[in-house]
Image (cartoon, rainbow, N blue to C red):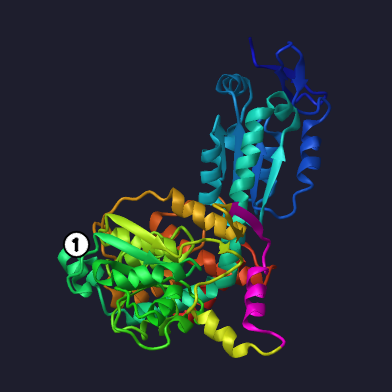
């Protein structure tokens, strides 16, 4: 049984009609003037540069969008039923769509494939938003797979929006911190392949089993155990938990910090001899607080590009929090197992942090008779929507962000190894990296809508995207090439 039949509109356009299970034909477009119908449909578009079409049909709206809207950067077409689409391709000429490098056709995709494509290609700062155009007659005929596609699009958009808001807030600071830290990198110890040298900074202590301390309230109960078994444990402290450990007389073997904000300085009240592992985007002043600072590349494209020089390793920080980064460090150092202490990812009994963290001393100094320390912590806990959870005769508050952190850590694949891009080519020695990067940025030609980038240019442009998000947040009128030029000018000044 044929899936589609072909009808002729009054203006002689070819219009596909889908045949339902009862043999009834449903035209996918107007049988009067499908081109005008497409114009009306596209009229709701503002300046979104990423369009998603659910259903191929005759391709009228898709072809018009690609032909007339030069500010469109990406078009995703999703449809289902390979045999039916083969029927359409045998009678309808889609060459104007298929030959456009901005257009991608997904046939029978899974929800994961759709989400992955959006996460990889959608750049809100450059594309000015996303808009979905459902071909209603097509979706009504086969709603289930399209509902799954819509859910995947919504899930991907939520993730992109969360990431974009972080970029808009921190993009400028990340870039400035990375540039300053690159200028002061002195160590390359962690790029050595042999385990003995990697662990040399730990004075021969075994990293086979790592005890990782986070700053959740349950850390309070674990401190006596950690103190009693101190000599038998290799302790990796998150920066927030460090003051609590030191206050309990416990000196960890290593510290991890990934926050780019200046208040991270509050975790380090005095200079320490403990090895401090820092994301390259960390505030430069933090490296001065340790006699043994070690930088690593986190998620920023510029730090990843720098890691290809072989000067620093790359760690997985995709979990979005420092506990996840500490687990990645333990994995990179060859630990076979890890134990987590204080990793609550919630507010047990409404308590936010373990005692001894810097917020306790900070709030203690600000309190008075009308606003005690508990008032400040209450403001901290209740600043975002909470959900109360009950388990094992107790309760805790949970936020969407903390729940996401917990889920990402639980889903993490554990594979102890040390592979900081040891096989990657060295682009330039660290001392020459900034000069080479500055020259590449100065001579870079930004692509037109239909241009394809080579891998090197694409890698450089990727380093600008977080900064682009921040500048666009400051000036929403900036878009496209104007935005990229503004980013280049800002970055060149910092370089």
Magenta-drawn segment: 370-390
**Left or right, 68 with reference to 107:** right
405 and 380: which is toward the camera:
380
Quarter occupied by the C terminus: bottom left
* Residue 180, position as x, y percentages in the image: 41, 81
**Left or right, 80 with reference to 282:** right
In which quarter of the view is residue 394 placed? Answer: bottom right
Measuring 28% from the left and 71% from the top, which residue is drawn there?
230
259 and 14: which is toward the camera:
259
* Residue 453, position as x, y percentages in the image: 45, 54
Residue 43 lies, with reference to residue 203, above or below; the image says above
Residue annotated with mark 1: 193
* Residue 489, position as x, y percentages in the image: 53, 76
Q: Is residue 388 magenta?
A: yes
Residue 431 lies, with reference to residue 97, above or below; the image says below
In which quarter of the view is residue 185 placed? Answer: bottom left
126 and 93: which is toward the camera:
126
405 and 205: which is toward the camera:
205
Q: In this view of the protein, can residue 384 be seen by the observer?
A: yes
**Left or right, 159 with reference to 321:** right
* Residue 102, position as x, y percentages in the image: 56, 45
Q: Is residue 260 magenta?
A: no
Dot 1 crowding, Cα within 10 Å, few <14, some 14–19, many 20+:
few
Total numbered labels: 1
Residue 263 lies, with reference to residue 148, above or below; the image says below
Quarter occupied by the N terminus: top right
**Left or right, 206 with reference to 27:** left
As helix, strand or loop, the secondary structure at mark 1 comes to loop
């Amino acid at each position: 049984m044929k899936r589609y039949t072909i009808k002729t509109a009054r203006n002689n356009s070819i219009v596909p009609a889908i045949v339902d299970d009862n043999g009834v034909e449903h035209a996918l477009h107007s049988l009067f003037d499908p081109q005008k119908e497409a114009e009306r449909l596209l009229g709701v578009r503002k300046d979104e540069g990423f369009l998603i079409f659910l259903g191929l049909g005759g391709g009228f709206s898709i072809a018009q969008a690609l032909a007339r809207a030069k500010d469109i950067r990406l078009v995703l077409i999703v449809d289902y039923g390979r045999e039916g689409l083969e029927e359409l391709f045998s009678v309808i000429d889609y060459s104007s769509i298929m030959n456009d490098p901005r257009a991608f056709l997904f046939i029978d995709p899974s929800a994961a494939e759709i989400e992955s494509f959006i996460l990889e290609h959608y750049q809100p700062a450059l594309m000015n938003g996303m808009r979905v155009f459902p071909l209603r007659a097509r979706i009504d005929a086969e709603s289930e797979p399209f509902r799954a596609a819509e859910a995947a699009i919504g899930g991907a958009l939520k993730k992109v929006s969360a990431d974009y808001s972080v970029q808009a807030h921190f993009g400028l600071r990340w870039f400035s911190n990375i540039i300053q830290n690159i200028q002061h990198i002195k160590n390359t110890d962690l790029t050595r392949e042999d385990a003995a040298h990697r662990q040399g900074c730990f004075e021969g202590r075994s990293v086979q089993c790592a005890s990782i301390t986070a700053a959740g309230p349950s850390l309070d109960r674990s401190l006596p155990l950690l103190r009693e078994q101190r000599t038998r444990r290799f302790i990796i402290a998150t920066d927030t938990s460090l003051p609590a450990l030191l206050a309990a007389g416990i000196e960890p073997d290593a510290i991890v910090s990934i926050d780019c904000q200046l208040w991270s300085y509050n975790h380090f009240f005095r200079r320490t001899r403990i090895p401090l592992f820092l994301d390259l985007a960390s505030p430069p002043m933090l490296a001065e607080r340790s006699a043994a600072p070690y930088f690593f590349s986190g998620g920023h494209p510029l730090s990843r590009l720098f890691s290809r020089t072989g000067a620093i390793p790359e760690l997985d920080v995709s979990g979005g929090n420092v506990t996840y980064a500490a687990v990645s460090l333990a994995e990179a150092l060859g630990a076979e197992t890890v134990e987590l202490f204080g990793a609550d990812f919630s507010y047990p009994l409404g308590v936010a942090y373990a005692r001894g963290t810097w917020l306790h001393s900070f709030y203690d100094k600000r309190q008075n008779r009308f606003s005690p320390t508990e008032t400040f912590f209450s403001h901290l806990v209740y600043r975002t929507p909470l959900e109360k959870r009950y388990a094992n005769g107790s309760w805790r508050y949970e936020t969407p962000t903390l729940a996401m952190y917990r889920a990402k850590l639980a889903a993490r694949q554990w594979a102890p190894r040390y592979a900081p891009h040891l096989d990657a080519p060295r682009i330039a020695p660290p001392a020459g990296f900034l000069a080479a990067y500055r020259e590449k940025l100065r001579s870079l030609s930004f692509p037109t809508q239909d241009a394809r980038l080579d891998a090197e240019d694409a890698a450089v442009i990727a380093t600008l995207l977080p900064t682009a998000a921040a500048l666009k947040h400051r000036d929403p009128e900036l878009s496209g090439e104007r935005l990229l030029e503004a980013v280049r000018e800002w970055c060149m000044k910092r370089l």
